[in-house]
Amino acid sequence: MALDLHAYLERIGYDGPVEPTLEVLDALHLAHATTIPFENIDILLGRPIRLDLPSLEDKLVRDRRGGYCFEHNTLFAAALEAVGFGGGSILRSLPMGPGPVVDQFGWRFRLVDDDGARVVQTLRPRGWIDLYAFTFEPQFPVDYEMANHFTSTHPNSPFTRTLTVQLCSQERSLILRDRKLIEETPSGETVGEVRDDELLGVLAERFTLSFPPGTRFDAARAGS
């Protein structure tokens, strides 16, 4: 089933060209990363995480929700296929091989080799930290289904224990972990606390995520 590309581009606020160029890849990546939040709220509400394209379009595009890594990556891959080519915290594309530091609006990233794997690192005031690693073995839909099932259901998964929401911009990264609100910039971070009675307002005002009054994310307190 093909992605409704027009609806997706409208969701991320992108009205530029869709030719298969590096410039278009960077523009789409930036628009997606700064518009659709990273969040695990459905897991905490006991809802299944579905990776089929219609479900992802309903949730992330039409319902204007966010999602976590499997959802974002599957939707973005479908968008890249729909515009003629395929390709976290990065705002634009990175070269696939280890190389020099890449500056993205003041955020600095690099790829390093770790025994054949690529590790994405970012520079913070305390030094270089690892974000995630990847290899080049082919992956199939069943691989994503198994990993997604474990991540979204296992009692020891951090995503079943802690409310996690993130929304990036060129200037700052806003992160909610349980009741801690963290605002990161390339030069540092500030941390605040969110009371339970403030939570739905913070999700709506700071992360563009609206839920009915009285919605509770009780699983987010399980690990505290």
Image (spheres, grey):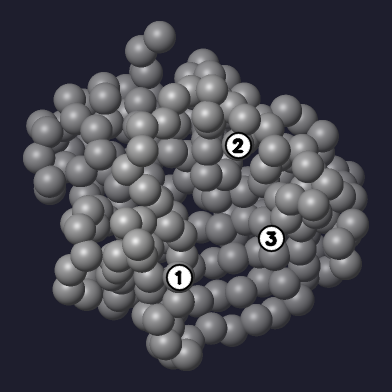
Q: Residues within 10 Å of mark 1 (few under 14, many from 20)?
A: some
Going by the image, does 122 lie left or right of 81? right
Number of numbered labels in the structure image: 3
> The residue tagged with tag 2: helix, strand or loop?
helix
> The residue tagged with tag 3: helix, strand or loop?
helix
Q: Residue furthest bottom?
A: 126
| Amino acid at dot 3 | Val
Cα separation between marks 3 and 1? 28 Å
| For residue 204, above or below residue 86 | below
Q: Quadrant of residue 169?
A: bottom left
Residue that mark 2 sits on = 147
Cα separation between marks 2 and 1? 21 Å
Residue that mark 1 sits on = 130
Q: Quadrant of residue 193?
A: bottom right
Residue 142 percent across, percent down from the top left: 54, 23
Residue 122 percent across, percent down from the top left: 38, 73
Q: Name the residue rendered at 45%, 77% in the picture.
A: 129
Q: Residues within 10 Å of mark 3 (few under 14, many from 20)?
A: some
| Amino acid at dot 1 | Asp
| For residue 2, above or below residue 80 | above
In which quadrant is the C terminus drawn? bottom right
Front-most of residues 9 and 20: 20
Residue that mark 3 sits on = 202
Mark sitting earlier along the chain (2/1): 1
Q: Nearer the viewer, mark 3 or mark 1?
A: 1
Front-most of residues 123 and 132: 132
In the rendered image, is residue 98 in sight? yes
Cα separation between marks 2 and 3? 30 Å
Mark sitting earlier along the chain (3/1): 1
| For residue 183, above or below residue 16 | below
